[in-house]
Image (cartoon, helix red, strand yellow):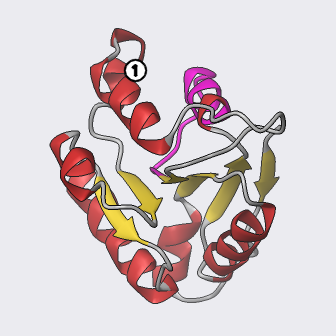
Amino acid sequence: MTESFDSKPNSSTENEEKLKRKILLADDEKANLFGLTMFLRGEGYEVASVESGQALLDELASGEKFDAVITDNLMILEDGTSGVSGVQALEYIRNNEKFKDLKNLPVIVLSASEIKETVEKLSGVYMAKPVDLNNIQEILEQEIKKSNK
């Protein structure tokens, strides 16, 4: 299930630029999704969210355009089994022909475990939990700008 949250326009040029940016969030923890969604909306981004790695891949495969992805690494399905992780989704995006147009899509993987080397090998960005919201916004902007060059 995808939830879309549209941001309200703000008068500053910086926020107007962000309003044009759409972020896809993936996390199995609804509280994390809600908190990060509210923060990003408050910063002027349009946000869509999903609750699993597979839903993340399905959303990207739907053809909807996103400027960046922020995903948790470990996402447990409702039946208690582990689903597609953030790293697995990143690997699939980078290596599958189906996503060839998304090779430069910024993907930030959030995790409490040490997976930095794996994420960076896949041209992703690793951020340790707990996440500093101001830091995530700064990295998000840097990665979007790099991908647009």
State which quadrant residue 142 falls in. Answer: bottom left
Q: Position of residue 51 (x, y in %)?
A: 73, 45
Number of on-image labels: 1
The residue lying at 59 percent from left, 67 percent from top is 19
Foreground of the two, 9 or 128: 128
The residue lying at 56 percent from left, 55 percent from top is 23
In the rendered structure, the answer to whether residue 48 lies left or right of residue 144 reads right
Foreground of the two, 72 or 3: 72
The residue that disc 1 covers is 99
- In magenta, the rendered stretch is 55-69
Q: Is residue 149 visible?
A: no
How crowded pointer 1 is (Cα within 10 Å; few <14, some 14-19, many 20+) is rated as some
Foreground of the two, 44 or 91: 91
> Height in image: 5 above or below 7?
above
Query: Any magenta on residue 85?
Result: no
Q: Is residue 32 visible?
A: yes
Give the residue type at disc 1: Phe
> Height in image: 34 above or below 49?
below
> Height in image: 25 above or below 132?
above
Q: Secondary structure at mark 1?
A: helix
Q: Position of residue 82 (x, y in %)?
A: 63, 35
The residue lying at 52 percent from left, 58 percent from top is 21
The residue lying at 40 percent from left, 61 percent from top is 113
